[in-house]
Image: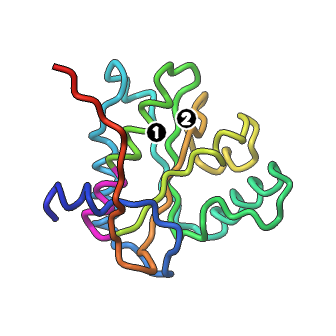
Amino acid sequence: MDFDKVIDTRVSTRKYIDKKIEKNNLEKIVDAGVKAPVGNSLYENMAITVISNKDLIQEILEEAREIVNDPKANPIYSAPYLIIISAKEGHITRLEDTACIIENMALKATDLEIGSCYIRGMFERFDKDARFIKKLNLEENFYPVHGLILGYPKEKLQGKNHKIKTNYID
């Protein structure tokens, strides 16, 4: 897909069909994240975990529901894939780096006609003792920062008419 079309088409997708993403497409999405800028090139301070295991996704969702005390909350929108971006404790630019990694992956997913949505709030509520962290096989002192959900969308990806007030000063 043409880059401008990718930019125009990328939207947050919250409704998915239950269809497996081909492994080579999943690898392309992750590779796009790996190529994102990271502060001071400290790539060793970042980690990407790709989860397609429905039981583990459900377990993470249940823990999120407990935290917000809402058994019906669905902050991952029943997506079949969850990618968690983690950072080493003390990594100062973890929020910015995570955002760059996720944006690159979301753009590549759009290029492949796969839906995505940046999941921030759910992960910001977890602490370092969240039960699911042990199952992520992270190196010591790495903790989840944010996530990206993926899946084939129920509806065709279509961009929105985004507008941000812009000033040009010469």
Residue that protrudes farthest toward the right in the picture: 69
| Magenta stretch: includes residue 144 | no
Q: Residues within 10 Å of mark 1 (few under 14, many from 20)?
A: some
Q: Residues within 10 Å of mark 2 (few under 14, many from 20)?
A: few
Q: Position of residue 123 (x, y in %)?
A: 64, 44
Q: Amino acid at mark 2?
A: Glu
Q: Nearer the viewer, residue 71 or 6?
A: 6
Left or right relative to 138: residue 102: left
Residue occupied by mark 1: 47
Q: Earlier in the sequence, mark 2 or mark 1?
A: 1
Left or right relative to 101: residue 74: right
Nearer to us: label 2 or label 1: 1
Q: Tally the numbered discs.
A: 2
Q: Is residue 39 above or below residue 55?
A: above
Mark 2 vs 1: CB contact within 8 A: yes
Which range is magenta? Answer: 105-113
Q: Is residue 37 above or below residue 117?
A: above
Q: Is residue 120 above or below residue 115?
A: above
Q: Residue at x 30, y 35 (%)?
A: 166
Q: Position of residue 37 (x, y in %)?
A: 30, 32
Residue occupied by mark 2: 139
Q: Amino acid at mark 1?
A: Ala
Q: Quadrant of residue 110?
A: bottom left
Q: Residue at x 65, y 59 (%)?
A: 75
